[in-house]
Image (cartoon, rainbow, N blue to C red):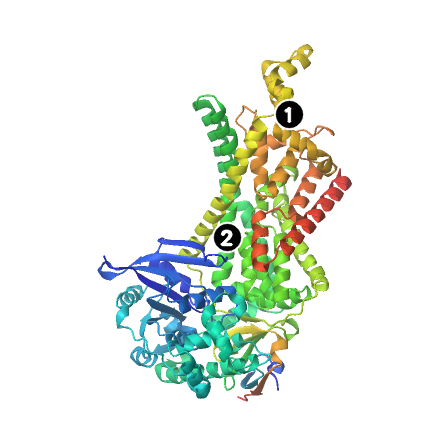
Amino acid sequence: MSKQINVALIGNPNTGKTSVFNALTGLNQKVGNYPGITVEKKEGICKLPRGVKAHIIDLPGTYSLNASSLDENVVIELLLNKNDKDYPDVAVVVSDVENLKRNLLLFTQIKDLEIPTILAINMSDRMAYKGISLDIAYLEEELKTKIALISTRKNTGIDELKELITNYKDLSVKPCLQASEIEPTYFNDLRKAFPNQLLYKLWLVITQDVNFGKTDRQTFEAVEDFKTKSKADLKRLQQKETIKRYQFINETLKAGQTIDLKSAKDLRIKLDRILTHKVWGYVIFAFILLLIFQAIYDWSSVPMDFIDSSFASLSEWVKDTLPEGAFTNLLAEGIISGLGGIVIFIPQIAFLFLFISILEESGYMSRVVFLMDRVMRRFGLSGKSVVPLISGTACAIPAIMAARNIESWKERLITILVTPFTTCSARLPVYLIIIALVIPEGRILGLSYQALTLMLLYLIGFGAAVGSAWILNKVLKIKSKSFFVVEMPNYKMPLVKNVALTVLEKTKAFVFGAGKIILAISIVLWFLASYGPGEDFNNAENIVSEQVASENLTEDELHQRIESHKLEHSFIGIAGHAIEPAIRPLGYDWKIGIAIVSSFAAREVFVGTLATIYSVGSDEEETIKNRMAGEVNPILGGPLFNFASGISLLLFYAFAMQCMSTLAIVKRETNTWKWPILQLVIMSTFAYIVALVAFQVLK
Amino acid sequence: MTLAELKRGQRGIIVDVSSIHIPLKLLEMGCLPGNMVELVQAAPFADPMYLNINGSHLAIRKETAIHIIIETVHE
């Protein structure tokens, strides 16, 4: 048995690094987190020629080894730590043939770390189109490496890359230039002070921002005594270093690369003329958003109805088939109903992630960043805040993490604080079921009222996010240097495999992540609803029979009365009645109250909770929606879910901060409990007031 | 003149960048003295600016562009 080869994929963003990772590992991959931080860690296994296996790790995209974000810092921490179990035996630098010059900067830095390095030049299918030709033998010689010309789109060159990885021991570990020549005395002193350390490694440790992590603390502290340069001097040196590297790269490419501009075609210019146009750019962006919402609503209704009725039948089947008893009831009423409440949203969540990943993959998202920057800045946000705000429509957790590429701390903090206002997929279940109950069917200009209501709720979410950003921008007194650099990548046809994998993986994460919470809450709720203290619950049969003795009820009606009496006096009923005074002015009964309270764990619990509460004691096979439509307001009479209480609920869910996972992420990203607690209190109070006003005005 | 004054479709050569005001990341993306820069597209009010620097396409704000000194190229 030979040991696995550790391979690290490193590269600039937008070079198709993840496509290379997918091509090497196929479905043999797993996504997790780096210990202690929320940076996504992708790793997988790849079978190489001659029975060798490789453990591949897809490192976060970075432009250089000088980290300016938490994600980039992961790359440096790994490459500087030889004792890490993932420390690469070989590094594969993935680059884009059209941006070779810039991509090689990172390559020369990796070479300086004396790690065996392969240069994978991706998108080679574009070479003819762009009039690029490369002298591979010359480049391999100058860059002291082996080159694999690959195209993940055309699926070429992957076998050659695997072959190179297998033979990694033949790779040179010599740097391709002497960066220390920029200031020989300084680097000589450094070398003398730490003779056993790699010079470039020392230099990286000195120049990294210590805020980021624990990069070889010991070395760093030892270096502190030696350090004779001010921050400004160091930065000047870094600039000199960068110039030196580019000189080398420019010279190498002058001889090793020819670009025939006459035969080059450029789709980018034509597309950008329209897509980033001062007027049309915005019109097209609005149109794309509208299309997405209409699609999510219309396309997913068929599979959703199917799932809803399937779960209702399954629950019925379990009740009929298994022997009667507490376990059967728990299974049928608690677990299956609760799970149905989450599985039903898979179609919509999958569609949402599909659109977001297409926007990202195609390169269009960067154009949106460019278009929106000036508008967003007025509200104290950055153009880059658009990415969190749009991906917040899927889930606030990855969205808040996406705020990491915002360079200014104030803009980033405001983005983090307001992102939970955007309508995340967990709100969708609540919206959909309430819209279906209280908004009439029918169409205007081909758009259904229900879809328009949903669109309006999304707009309210964005409006709340932007409005509160504006207030925060005025209130927060944070001085932070703001700068803004965003790459405008080439337009690309999204790769089906990449999009499919993203959708699959994100949907899975959502279902399992939320599924666990929902399952647990469903079980707890079922117990609380099925048992109760005192006479009123345990002696319900006799009490109800006596009360209604004169009413001449059928057996079914009597049974119904007994069950609802039991539910009212169960543990959950008692708790629900306790909070009822607070929510009655909003138009809700105690059952909705319980659902709202349990939603503070996660919003999507709402539907599952109501499903569990309503199905306890109900015998008939019914969908969640029908059960809710049948509920009657105990005080006002009429359907419990009417226009006024429905709108009030929609608005409450639009504004309230009900997601423990989001609060935990905000705490991690801002490093204090102050911000998540403020979010929880302010958002939820605001939600209560708005819902109250809405119900009182509309009722 | 500064990069902020560049018109759409015009090209220039970067002469100097004030390293205190310019983030290292921008330098690493190719914004260095001697490199060619072209304004590809400007958002409303010419801010941010969509540039082609040394073959790299990127967008920066006007407030950053005023710290980059260029010389226009006449073609």
User: In x, y percent, where is residue A123?
Assistant: 38, 68
- Residue matched to label 2: A353
Quadrant (top left, top right, bottom left, bottom right) of the N terminus of chain A = bottom left
Write down the quadrant of residue A533 in the picture: top right
For discs 1 and 2, the disc positioned in front in the rendered view: 1
**Secondary element at tag 2:** helix
Q: Residue at 43% across / 24% down in the picture?
A: A322
Q: Which of A121 and A125 is in front in this view?
A: A121
Residue denoted by label 1: A569
Q: In this view, does A407 lie above or below A495?
A: below
- The chain identifier of the residue carrying mark 1 reads A
Q: Is mark 1 on a helix, strand or loop?
A: loop
Q: Position of residue A461 (x, y in %)?
A: 65, 52
Residue shown at 61% from the left, 13% from the top: A554
- Residue B11 visible, this orientation: yes
Q: Residue A382 carries which label?
A: none
In this view, A459 is above or below A629: below
B70 relative to A364, above or below: below
Residue A631 found in image quarter: top right
Q: Seen in the image, is A605 located left or right of residue A137?
A: right
Residue A100 visible from this viewpoint? no
N-term mark: 1 or 2: 2
Q: Label 1, label 2: how many angstroms apart (C-alpha)? A: 43 Å
* Residue A541: image location, x then y, percent: 61, 16
Tell me which chain the residue with mark 2 is part of. Answer: A
